[in-house]
Amino acid sequence: MAKVSTDKKKIQELLSRGVAEVVELKSLEQKLKSGKQLTVKLGIDATGPNLHLGRSIPLLKLRAFQELGHQAVFIIGDATAEVGDTSDKDSERPMLKPEQVKINMKTYLKQAGLVVDLNKTKVLYNSVWLKKLGFKEIGEQADSFSLAEFMARDNIKRRHQKGQRISLRELLYPLMQGYDSVQVKADVELGGTDQRFNLLAGRTLQQHYGQRPQDIMTNNLIEGTDGRKMSSSWGNTINLTDSAKDMFGRVMSLPDQLILPYFIHCTISGMNEIKQIEGALQRGLNPKEAKEKLAKAIVSFYYDSKVAAREAENFKAQFSSKSLPQDMLEKKFRAKNLVDLLVEIKLASSKSEARRLIQQKGVKINQKTSDEASSFTVGDVIQVGKRKFVRLK
């Protein structure tokens, strides 16, 4: 068993940095100061193949518990991914087929290992226990909750008021996540603010099974590159497996108001350093300089400092001097219009996305903003956003 640290400063930062709420705060603080090793649970459903910086926030918190000597438990939600969590959705999430879930979670461990020490982490798949449950056990679990509690959730209430369909399946998801806590006898569970109902369900079910209810720690949600909540379905993510070039460039494309939230939630930079950057911004530091520090901090964590320094220089050369990248892709084409071309050379996944990019002034030909009627020919450089370039051949 690892030696547990009771360092007051580290405990205080653990309880406050990027934290939206702790239930129960006094209980958790006492446990951390006691020196007892806690079982800290984080579950992530395999609803897509990539973990992004939004997912890194609870992973970084799990890492912080781990560094204090507590037992990290990482649950890959294969069974829960099939059913689907409705917590952050304004419409019914479709069920996933087992084959798709298997594909999605293929590299989850490798990705999580970029943040936490897998050698000191218990890794579990919740299908092991959830698929053994029968109607009797599920019925007993469901008896601990009322329909009114589920319907009181903001997104469910809105859907109900709009007359949108709410399936009975969606009511079962919190039971599944809650039962995970029972199985691992969690002392603490981590998750985003959108997970609050599910996290509390774990407390309720633990009491039902005669266990002491877990404390819960929720983290704030961060916005993606377009200012909306980071979500794979919106394509506004910065993925943990992005190339160093893409990662650096996407961080540099963030709105200025996200610099400090990203420093706090998505880096391991010290709080004193972050406060110094905050003060410098208030005194007139160019946000671009602060953003470069942020991009270096993030790329250094997932790659190393030398790679981060290299990408900073490449970024300056490419965008500060308005020069084009030397290593851009070259592709042949047959398309006669810009919409079809973007799909053909894989700068857009569909015609609808291509039209949206054009309408949002996100497409350039030879560094000039283009519309659907713009012409192109061999040798032209097609650019989407700030980082995607293709030369036509």
Image (cartoon, rainbow, N blue to C red):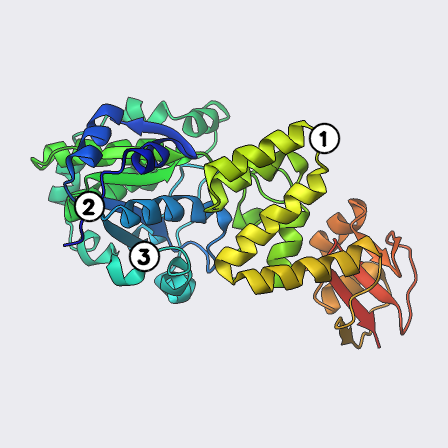
Q: Amino acid at mark 1?
A: Gly
Disc on res. 159: none
Quadrant (top left/top right/bottom left/bottom right) for the N terminus:
bottom left
Task: Give the vertical position of 352 relative to 22 (above or below).
Answer: below
Disc 3 designates what residue?
78
Farthest residue, direction left: 210
Quarter location, residue 7: top left
Position of residue 77 measured from the top left corner of the image (x, y, whole percent): 31, 53
Position of residue 241 measured from the top left corner of the image (x, y, whole percent): 51, 62
Question: Between marks 1 and 3, how big is the CA–CA gap?
Answer: 48 Å
Tag 2's secondary structure?
loop
Tell me which residue sits at (22%, 38%) in the image: 6
Tell me which residue sits at (81%, 47%) in the image: 361
Position of residue 245 measured from the top left corner of the image (x, y, whole percent): 64, 62
Task: Give the vertical position of 309 relative to 328 (above or below).
Answer: above
Categorize mark 2 by other alpha carbons within 10 Å: few (<14), some (14-19), many (20+): many
Tell me which residue sits at (37%, 34%) in the image: 13
Q: Amino acid at mark 3?
A: Asp
Q: Is residue 131 visible?
A: yes
Quarter location, residue 315: bottom right
Marks 3, 2: nearer the viewer: 2
Q: Is residue 123 visible?
A: no
Tag 1's secondary structure?
loop
Tag 3's secondary structure?
helix
Marks 1, 3: nearer the viewer: 1
Question: Between marks 1 and 2, how big is the CA–CA gap?
Answer: 42 Å
Disc 1 designates what residue?
284
Nearest the viewer among 341 and 386 is 386
Tally the marks.
3
